[in-house]
Image (cartoon, rainbow, N blue to C red):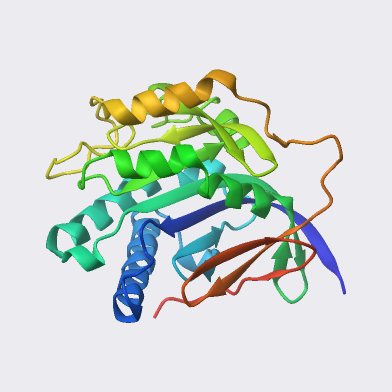
Amino acid sequence: MNATYEYRALLACDIAGSAGRGEQRLQRIRGVLRAALFDSLDAADLDGRDFAYFDTGDGCLLVAPAGLPKARLLVPLLPELNARLREHNRHADQGTRLRLRAALHAGEIRVDEEGAASGAPFEVLARLLDSAPLRQAALAGPDGTPVAAILSRHVYEETVGHGHAGLDTDAFTAADVRVKEYAARAWLWYPGSPVGPRAGSDREDAGSRTCTDAKANADARSDARSGSGEQPAGPEPRTAEQSVHATGHGTVFAVHRGDQYIRHDDRS
């Protein structure tokens, strides 16, 4: 079977606290997330039909088209997504409100002729999404800031580090990620950061400079004191590939040799 290796930007989202809400509420919030994400892509002048979208049960995985600059998945996409989820939460009951963890990474993935994708970048993405610093940041902010994101070192250095418009280094806090055998330095885009919305404001301002949540700052900066390079820990080189499988009640990120099937979903 013919396959190509293509460099792609990746965005994974996970709904915090999705367990125990019941099937009907879970289906409702999954629909809200999908609609908010595609509306945010439109607002960011991106065509959702160009992306591969994968529903992971309690979140989603978005694979950007080849050639899309990584910075386009940050600003204005993240503030736009935050604004839409914030508006949803304003009118939703407790059982259908959303807090979202998001992770961004990029790398060379394997894509075969049937559209299946696999590769180590998916493993990095899964570890970032499951990391303690991101989970802490997602819980630290007020209800008005439902999105907290984490950037891999690679994405941070080639977007924020290159000084792309709208990306201020003050908006990100370094954190040390350690999940199982994976250890890496990453950067948090936390609730209330300058690139994000003002907590409790009626309009989202991606350029505003606001005070960050004290707990999120303390936790994240404490984690940042002993970071390492973005390589899985251990003396042996990694040979596993990452695949993602969706279930009815969550996402299983399995580290093994296998494929992740991603389809292009046209918007109705």
Query: Which quarter of the figure is the C terminus placed in?
Result: bottom left
Apparent side of residue 63 relative to residue 267 in the rendered image (left or right): right
Spot occupied by residue 58 in the image (x, y as percentages of width and height)? 44, 66
Residue 234 figure quarter: top right
Q: Position of residue 180 (x, y in %)?
A: 65, 44
Q: Count the numbered circles shown.
A: 0
Residue 15: where, in percent of width, then height? Answer: 39, 59
Location of the N terminus (image quadrant): bottom right
In the foreground, 90 or 168: 90
Q: Splitting the image into 4 quarters, where does residue 112 fall?
A: bottom right
Tell me: residue 189, above or below residue 69.
above
Report whether residue 163 is seen: no
Query: Residue at 40% across / 54% down in the picture?
Result: 45
One can see residue 129 in this view: yes
* In this rendering, position of residue 40 left or right of residue 236: left
Determine whether, in the image, residue 213 is placed left or right of residue 186.
Answer: left
Residue for point 54% across, 63% down: 51
Residue furthest out toward the top:
225
Q: Nearer the viewer, residue 11 or 205?
A: 11
Q: At 73% across and 51% down in the image, what residue appears?
A: 120
Q: Position of residue 222 (x, y in %)?
A: 45, 22
Q: In the visual, does 18 lie left or right of 94?
A: right
Residue 230 lies, with reference to residue 170, above or below; the image says below
